[in-house]
Image (cartoon, rainbow, N blue to C red):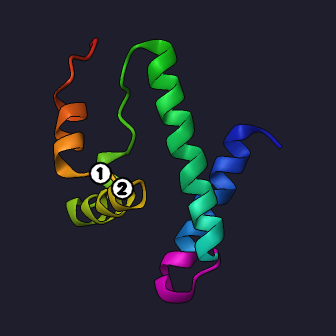
Amino acid sequence: MSAAACVDAFVRLVDQALANPANGALTDQELAEVMTAAVRLYAARCEARGSFPAPLIATRVTATEVATAASEMVRVVDLNMFDLSMWHGRPRAR
C-alpha cells in the first residue's frame, strides 16, 4: 500500500473515531503511537532540511484542538514554559 493510501485510510479512520471521541476506533495507545511517529518524523525532517513546513492543515483544526494537544505533549516530555519559549524563539531558516 502506498503512503498516500495509508494516509487516506488513517484519515477515514479518524473521521469515524471523531463520531465517538470518547471511545473511537483507535485505542489511546494506538493514537499515542501514531502521534509519536508523526512528531518524530516532523522533527527529523525539519532538522534534515533546515526548514519548518506547516505541521498541520490550519483549516482542519481549531486553536483549542492545537492548544490541547500541544499542552499535553509539553507535559508528557516534562518541558516547562521557559524551555518552550527558548525553542520557540530560536532563529530559523525560512
Q: Where is residue 39 shown, x and y percent of the image?
A: 50, 43
Q: Quadrant of the C terminus?
A: top left
In terms of depth relative to the viewer, which is nearer, 39 or 90?
A: 90
In the rendered structure, which amino acid carries the disc numbered 2? Asp
Question: In the displayed structure, would residue 31 be above or below residue 91?
Answer: below
Question: In the displayed structure, would residue 27 be above or below residue 56?
Answer: below
Q: Residue at x 29, y 51 (%)?
A: 59
Snapshot quadrant of residue 69:
bottom left
Q: CA distance from mark 2 to mark 1?
A: 29 Å
Snapshot quadrant of residue 41:
top right
Q: Secondary structure at mark 2?
A: loop
Q: Which mark is residue 59?
A: 1
Q: Which mark is residue 78?
A: 2
In terms of depth relative to the viewer, which is nearer, 16 or 92?
A: 92
Q: Where is residue 43 shown, x and y percent of the image?
A: 47, 32
Q: Quadrant of the N terminus?
A: top right
Snapshot quadrant of residue 27:
bottom right
Q: How many marks are shown on the rendered structure?
A: 2
| 56 displayed left or right of 49 | left
In the rendered structure, which amino acid carries the disc numbered 1? Thr
Q: Which residues are magenta?
A: 17-26
